[in-house]
Image (tube, grey):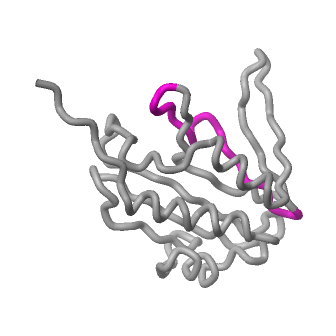
Amino acid sequence: MTPAAPQRSAAAAHVTERLVSFLTNLKSSEELTPENVGRQFGVTLSPEDGESLYRSPDLGGGWNYGVSVSPSNKSMKRGFNFWLYNSQRNADPKPVCALSLGALRKQLVAHGFTEEFSYSEIGGVDGVYFVKNDIVLTLTPRDVVASNGDEVCVMAIQTTDGR
C-alpha cells in the first residue's frame, strides 16, 4: 500500500492569491510599508531584527509562510520578501505548491512588469527579474521547486532593493 499524496492546502492557495494580487497592484517601493503589506495579507507585521515580519500558523503538512518588509536607508529602497517554509527539510512541497512560475509570470507581465534574465557563465539562468517602476522582483533557482512533472512552483519571491 502506498501513502496518499498530500492534498493541496486551501490556505496556501488563498495566501498565494493575496500575494499575486498584492504584487500585481504594486506601483512603487514606497508602498512597501508594514501597514500596507499587513493589510494586503490580512495580518500584522511585528518588528524583528531591523525589519517588520509575520510568520503564519500551519498551512497544512507543517508548511508556513512568512512576509517581511525592510526599511529604506541611504543605499537601499524599502524591501519585501515572501517565502513558504517547513521545519522538515525534505517535506513534500505539494501541499503549498499553489502558484506556478508560469502563472506568476503571466500575471506580472499582464500588469506592467517586464521580465529580465540573469544568465550564468555556462548558460543556465541565475535569476529572473520582474521590473516595474522602481520595483525589481527577484526569483532565483532556490526560490522555485519542480512539482507535478513540468510545473515549477514558486516558493519565495523578494525585491532587489539597491538604489
Q: Position of residue 110 (x, y in %)?
A: 79, 55
Q: Residue at x 56, y 67 (%)?
A: 18
Task: Work out whether 55 lies above or below 130.
Answer: below
The total of numbered circles placed on residues is 0
Q: Is residue 17 left or right of residue 115?
A: left
Task: Work out whether 87 lies above or below 29.
Answer: above
Q: Residue at x 55, y 27 (%)?
A: 150
Q: Is residue 135 magenta?
A: yes
Q: Position of residue 96 (x, y in %)?
A: 41, 49
Q: Residue at x 85, y 50 (%)?
A: 114
Q: Is residue 7 left or right of residue 114?
A: left
Q: Is residue 20 magenta?
A: no
- Locate residue 21: give its quadrant: bottom right
Q: Residue at x 76, y 24 (%)?
A: 120
Quarter of the rendering occupied by the C terminus = bottom right
Question: From which residue to which does the magenta span run?
Answer: 133-149
Quarter of the rendering occupied by the N terminus = top left
Q: Nearer the viewer, residue 45 or 148?
A: 148
Q: Position of residue 68 (x, y in %)?
A: 56, 67
